[in-house]
Amino acid sequence: MVRPDLVKTLRLLLLKVALSAVACGVVACGGPAPAKGPRDVLTQYAVALDEGRVEDAYALLSDEAKKTLPFDAFRRMVKENPDEVKQVSQSLLRPSGPPRVTATVSSPSGESLLLVYEDGAWRVDGSAIDLYSQANPKSALMAFVRAFDNKRWDILMRFVPESEAEGLSAKKLETYWTGEQKEELENLTRAIKAALPTAKLEVIGDHATMPYGGSGTVELLLEDGRWKIQEFK
């Protein structure tokens, strides 16, 4: 039986490798052979995993990924989970669209701006004009807080998952959020807002999690291309 924690680690590692590829897209990475761009890095990594060349695969990881997963732990994970590693390598080798090189600039308040590298120059992504973007988990949380601060109950309805939206309306949401639960919900949104500038979100597939307020967590769900608030814990 596949251990869920190992699958989770492998998926997170896959994400970090993708980020490593972006970093290596302009300057060739160290490792078994120079890479021309992000797709080349991912292909080299996948082939190295598939052929059992653990050191070559590890050499293609970013410094941040290596801090999270030391070489001995990486080698042990590859050795003890050959089927899962094979799945990861095969998924990386499947055809996909051209890589998209991006960068995110964050302000001290936690606001972030996405830049896209196009035609040899950095340009501001279209998401910058969307005040209530749900394109990614962090943007969704910032939009959620902004909508609450501005009392945009109609906007807050967008963050309700489909499974919980039946019978709910903006007016009912306003009644609930301004009633007996008002103080608790205000404290919750303040805690999320305070956590956003340094937040490290964990994204696995169509689910994301962010810790806040010391012991709380907010869970998000991706539905129809938009991130929604699934649960506060």
Image (cartoon, rainbow, N blue to C red):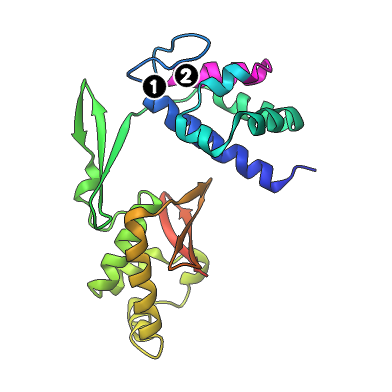
Q: Residue, x 55% and y 36% (percent of image)?
A: 13
Prevailing secondary structure of the magenta residues = helix
Q: Which residue is mark 2?
A: 41
Residue density around tag 2, few if under 14, some if 14–19, many if 20 or more, within 10 Å: many
Residue 83 position within the rendered picture, expressed as x and y whole percent measured from the top left: 74, 30
**Does 76 sit above or below residue 24?**
below
Q: Which circle's residue, 2 or 1, is located before the other in the chain?
A: 1
Q: Residues within 10 Å of mark 1 (few under 14, many from 20)?
A: many
Give the magenta range: 38-54
Along the viewing direction, whichever of 151 and 197 lies nearer the viewer? 197
- In the image, residue 189 sits, relative to residue 129, either above or below, namely below
Q: Tag 2: residue type?
A: Val
Element type where label 2 sits in the image: helix
Residue drawn where x is 24% and y is 25% of the image = 118
Would residue 93 be visible to someone looking at this image? no
Which residue occupies the foreground of this view, 87 or 79? 79
The numbered dot on residue 24 is 1
Left or right of 205 in this view: 136: left
Instruction: Verify CB contact (< 8 Å) between mark 2 and mark 1.
Output: yes
